[in-house]
Image (tube, helix red, strand yellow):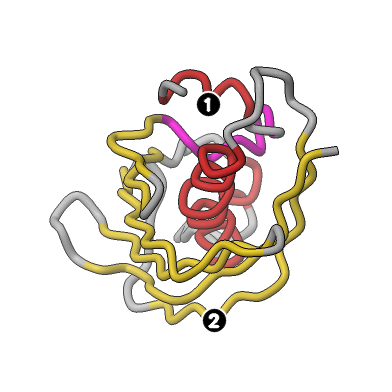
């Protein structure tokens, strides 16, 4: 399965697709990027005159790259989009703000994948290589 196959199978579309590129992926982890478009709706109100990316969106980026992309590879299904995904837990520490136009890279390392549950250690870094958030994300990823 190629990186493009995985991107095709993601069950998201703009404006809720937060994966631009998969840099590398194997059965133990994934590295991918996303650049925050300054025109995303949530920036107009979070915070007024000083937009910052909400933590829930940072968590979603880490989930899409670090959990869902990896889960698709691990399931190794055909190219149809018949997968169901549910986030089951997160434990994220936010270290630095992420602003509009910033490009982030997510690094995910599989802790385990069994009985349809995937648990990963995730780290998000900015373009300077600084950690902006880190934690553990788990979810159920099953074929329908």
Is residue 90 visible in this depiction of the protein? yes
**Does dot 2 land on a helix, a strand or a loop?**
strand
Left or right: 9 as drawn, with respect to 22: right
Secondary structure predominantly adopted by residues drawn in magenta? loop
- Closest to the observer: 14 or 41? 14
Going by the picture, which residue comes out furthest to the left? 128
User: What span is in magenta?
Assistant: 12-20
The relative height of residue 37 versus residue 97 in the rendered view (above or below) is: above
Q: Quadrant of residue 77?
A: top right
The relative height of residue 82 versus residue 114 in the rendered view (above or below) is: above
* Residue for point 29% across, 37% down: 24
Q: Quadrant of residue 28?
A: bottom left
Q: Position of residue 13 (x, y in %)?
A: 68, 28
Q: In this figure, which residue is indicated by the disc labeled 1?
A: 7
Q: Earlier in the sequence, mark 1 or mark 2?
A: 1
* Residue for point 76% across, 37% down: 83
* Classed neighbour count for the residue bearing mark 2: other residues with Cα under 10 Å, few (<14), some (14–19), many (≥20): few
């Amino acid at each position: 399965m190629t990186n493009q196959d995985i991107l095709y199978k993601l069950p998201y579309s703009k404006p809720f697709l937060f994966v631009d590129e998969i840099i590398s992926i194997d059965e133990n982890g994934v590295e991918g990027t996303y650049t925050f478009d300054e025109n995303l709706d949530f920036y107009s109100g979070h915070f007024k005159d000083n937009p910052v990316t909400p933590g829930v969106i940072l968590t979603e980026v880490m989930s899409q790259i670090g959990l869902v992309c990896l889960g698709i590879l691990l399931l190794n299904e055909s190219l149809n989009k018949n997968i169901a995904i549910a986030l089951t837990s997160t434990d994220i520490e936010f270290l630095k703000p992420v602003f509009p136009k910033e490009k982030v890279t997510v690094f995910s390392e599989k802790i385990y994948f069994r009985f349809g549950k995937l648990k990963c250690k995730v780290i998000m870094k900015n373009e300077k290589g600084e950690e902006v958030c880190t934690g553990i994300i788990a979810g159920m990823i099953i074929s329908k």
